[in-house]
Image (cartoon, rainbow, N blue to C red):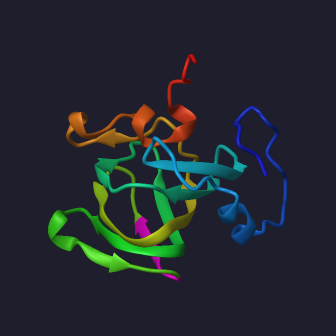
Amino acid sequence: MSDSVSDAPPKSGRFDIGAIAAALPDSATTMLVDTYLTDRPAASARVFRVYRPTPAHYHEACDEYLYVISGRGTFWIGDASDEAEFGPGQLLFFERGVVHAMPRLIEGPVVFLSVDTPRRAPTDVIFVDSSTGTAQSFMARNATPDPA
């Protein structure tokens, strides 16, 4: 399991998604925390936990597939009027540039297996309203380290 793009990605692997999800922290100051399973130019695969609702945003460089491992919430794709509940076993998909959001977390922990094609850079998150988030507030790996 690799948390860092600088680590050489495996050429193959078997991953215990449940164990990886269980190892994610119980809380975070950012909207989500992730860990990479693979990180290749053609695609990346991650497990991530969501800690708070995510405002409308999109990704410029990749399509995203989100498989729900655990938890329930609401998600919309393309338009807020599309909001619907999701739960374990469901797959959410949207192409690059498609605005999406997770306005409500109903039951936690909300954990996804994400496959991004091609690879999604951790900073590739653009909020529709820039006052609702930044790459640094979105994902722990982008957060500014606490100097203390």
Residue found at x 54% / y 65%: 112
**Residue 76 drawn at (x, y percent):** 27, 67
For the image shown, how many numbered marks are present on the structure?
A: 0
| Left or right, 90 with reference to 39 | left
Reply above or below: 87 against 113: below
Q: Quadrant of the C terminus?
A: top right
Residue found at x 53% / y 39%: 140
The prevailing secondary structure element of the residues shown in magenta is strand
Q: Residue furthest left?
A: 81
| Left or right, 16 with reference to 140 | right
Residue found at x 21% / y 72%: 82
**Residue 33 drawn at (x, y percent):** 55, 48
Q: Residue furthest front?
A: 148
Q: Residue furthest top?
A: 147
**Residue 128 drawn at (x, y percent):** 22, 43
| Residue sitting nearer the eye, 107 or 10 | 107
Reply above or below: 59 against 78: above
Span shown in magenta: 89-93
**Residue 144 drawn at (x, y percent):** 51, 24
Whether 64 is among the magenta residues is no
Reply above or below: 99 against 123: below
Residue found at x 30% / y 58%: 101
| Left or right, 86 with reference to 128 | right
| Left or right, 74 with reference to 10 | left
